[in-house]
Amino acid sequence: MKAKELKDFLTKRISEIKNSERFKEFIDFCSNFHNYSYYNLLSIYLHKPNATWVAGIKTWNRLKRRIKKGERGIPILAPIIKKVEEIDKETGEVIKIEKLAGFRIVYVWDVSQTHGKELPIDKIAKPLKGKAEQYPTLKQLVSEKFCPVIEKPLGKELKGYTDYSIIAINSELDEAHKLKTLFHELSHYLLHSSVDYSKTRKEFEAELTAYLVCRKLGIDSSSYSLDYLAIYSELKNEEFEKAVDKSIKAADHIFSTLTSKQFKTA
C-alpha cells in the first residue's frame, strides 16, 4: 500500500465514522493516545480498535520486546523531511531549512502484539501532579475501614506497596498520585493476598480498580492509569474478561464502603 492509497482509504472512512454511533467510540479511543495525527489515530483505530499503546519496531527492540510471530503491523503516515536551500529575505544569505516533501508508510505494533521484558512504567506513564483535596479524608477512611495507611520515603521508582497488613505510600509523591496509589495498593490488599496468578494480571486488576474508584469519586487519573493499563493488558480473552469483572466488583465495594460514611465525592 502506498501513502496516497492509505490516505484515500482513511478519508473515505472519516464520513462513515462521523455519521455513526462509532464516533464517540473513536473519540474515546483517541483519548488514550498522545502525539499522533488525526489520520494516524484513525488508521490505528480502523486496523486495531483495541490498541492501547503502539510503537515502532525499533522502540520495541530498545525496550527488549519482540513482535509476536504472525502479527501484522499497523500502517501510519510518517512525514518525509528534506533540507533545502533558500535565500533569506532579510539578509540575502543562503540558508538551509527543512521542508515537508511528502509522506511514507511506516508500521507500528500494539503492546498486545509483542512479548518480552516487562515495560518500564515511569518511562511511559508519567506520575500525576498537583493537589488532591480529598486525599487526607480518603486516606483516613481507608485506614478506618480496611487497613492502616502510612506514608514514608520509598525512592524514585516505588510508588507504594502493601504487605497485606498495612498500605505504604511514597511520601515524596504529589497528592494527586498518592490518592491514585492509595486505591491501587488497596486493590492489591483486597484482591491478591491469597491468589496465585501472574504479576501482569495482578497489576492490571489493581490499576483498573484504582482507575474505576477514582472515576466514581470524580477524579481523573487517566493520564497515568491508561498508559499503565496498556502495559499490563497482555491477558488472554477469558482471563482479561475475568480481570475486568473482578475489578468492577472491587471498585464498587471500595466506593460503597468509603461513601457509607457521609462523604462528599465532589
Image (tube, rainbow, N blue to C red):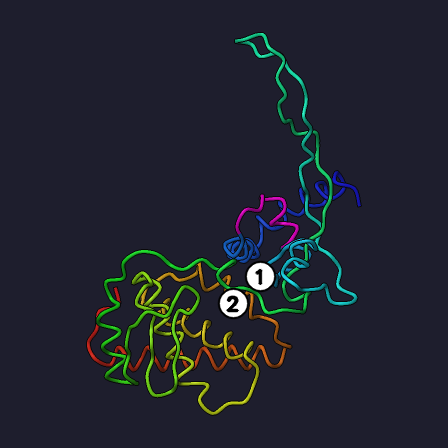
**Residue 141: where, in percent of width, then height?**
24, 78
Q: Work out how far the residue at label 1 is from the one at label 2, CA to CA, in angstroms.
A: 8 Å
**Rendered view: 4 above or below 189:** above
- Disc 2 crowd, CA 10 A, few/some/many (<14, 14-19, 20+): many
- Which amino acid type corresponds to the residue marked 2 in the rendered image? Leu
**Rendered view: 225 above or below 239:** above
**Residue 167: where, in percent of width, then height?**
34, 80
Q: Residue at x 23, y 62 (%)?
A: 133
The total of numbered circles placed on residues is: 2
Q: Is residue 189 left or right of residue 24?
A: left
**Rendered view: 55 above or below 142:** above
Q: Magenta part of the protein: which range? A: 34-44
- Which amino acid type corresponds to the residue marked 1 in the rendered image? Thr
189 and 244: which one is in front? 189
Q: Is residue 260 left or right of residue 222?
A: left
58 and 128: which one is in front? 58
Q: Answer yes or no: do the residues labelled 1 and 2 have beta carbons within 8 Å? A: yes
* Residue 229, numbered circle: 2
